[in-house]
């Protein structure tokens, strides 16, 4: 008799546990949250300065975002080996006045581009440029003081931080080391969201740039041309 109550409680707990698991299981055709927000990762971010095939008076700043498609999270995709509509948003922050505590005095630049489709396990690069006249006007160095890359796959953001606020290790290349703490990231992002509006259109994807370097066309995917009419 003394062991009856504990046995019943154990059985009840097991029953509730099984029921809970069944209730939480996603539909057969629905991608898991983990799969959906790790479909594409940032493999590397590279900064260079270039004279744009010798045609530019002032050196331009180039940002290369190397993407790594891991899987297609869409269960209804026609071809699971390809990931469609990967939106890449790059934000750069420069502390030109050497005032690290006053982010309002920093210069922020932001641009987005949407990759039409990319093959799984085949890295591709998306390039962004800051024109040489802006680089000279704003006294910009090759490397920004902070940067972060945000990704969306078919409208689903690719997580930079988990539910506990810890940085997602697989996305370490997407964010500056200074911003690997979520509080620091959120603080800088708030200033960048506002500050980048002052420089709208300065940073741009490569398909809006003339006199491109040859390696850009070789490594870059096709894009959804959001600058053009859908007619």
Image: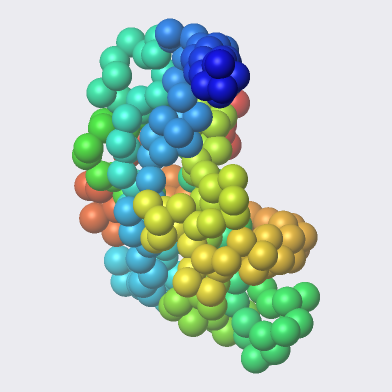
Answer whether residue 57 is visible to the viewer in this image: no
Q: Residue at x 50, y 29 (%)?
A: 33
- Indicate the position of residue 118 as horizontal and vertical percent values: 31, 32
Q: Nearer the viewer, residue 66 or 75?
A: 75
Q: Nearer the viewer, residue 135 or 67?
A: 67
Specify whether 191 is left or right of 90. right
- Indicate the position of residue 115 as horizontal and vertical percent values: 42, 36
Answer whether residue 96 is visible to the viewer in this image: yes
Q: Residue at x 77, y 75 (%)?
A: 104
Q: Residue at x 61, y 61 (%)?
A: 182
- Residue 60 drawn above or below residue 86: below
Q: Nearer the viewer, residue 16 or 115?
A: 16
Specify whether 206 is left or right of 107. left
- Residue 82 drawn above or below residue 122: above
Q: Nearer the viewer, residue 155 or 58?
A: 155
- Indicate the position of residue 145 as horizontal and vertical percent values: 54, 77
Tell me where residue 192 sits by quadrant: bottom right
Quadrant of the image containing the C terminus = top right
How many marks the image carries: the answer is 0
- Residue 7 drawn above or below residue 174: above
Q: Which coloring applies here?
A: rainbow
Outermost residue toward the bottom?
Answer: 98
Q: Residue at x 59, y 45 (%)?
A: 163
Tell me where residue 19 sits by quadrant: top right
Quadrant of the image containing the N terminus = top right
Specify whether 231 is left or right of 79. right
Outermost residue toward the front?
Answer: 1
């Amino acid at each position: 008799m003394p062991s009856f109550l504990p046995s019943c409680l154990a059985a009840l707990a097991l029953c509730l546990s099984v029921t809970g698991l069944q209730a939480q299981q996603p539909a057969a055709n629905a991608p898991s949250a983990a799969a959906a927000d790790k479909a594409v990762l940032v493999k590397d971010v590279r900064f260079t300065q270039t004279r744009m095939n010798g045609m530019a008076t002032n050196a331009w700043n180039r940002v290369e975002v190397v993407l790594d498609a891991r899987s297609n999270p869409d269960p209804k995709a026609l071809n699971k080996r390809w990931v469609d509509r990967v939106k890449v948003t790059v934000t750069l922050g420069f502390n030109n006045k050497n005032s690290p505590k006053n982010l309002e005095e920093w210069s922020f630049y932001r641009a987005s581009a949407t990759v039409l489709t990319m093959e799984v396990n085949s890295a591709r690069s998306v390039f962004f440029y800051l024109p040489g006249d802006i680089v000279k006007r704003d006294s910009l160095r090759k490397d920004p003081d902070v940067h972060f890359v945000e990704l969306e796959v078919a409208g689903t953001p690719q997580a930079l931080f988990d539910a506990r606020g810890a940085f997602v290790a697989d996305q370490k290349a997407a964010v500056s080391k200074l911003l690997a703490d979520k509080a620091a990231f959120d603080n800088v992002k708030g200033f960048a969201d506002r500050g980048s509006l002052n420089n709208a259109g300065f940073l741009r994807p490569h398909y809006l740039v003339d006199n491109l370097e040859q390696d850009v066309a070789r490594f870059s995917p096709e894009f959804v041309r959001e600058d053009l009419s859908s007619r």
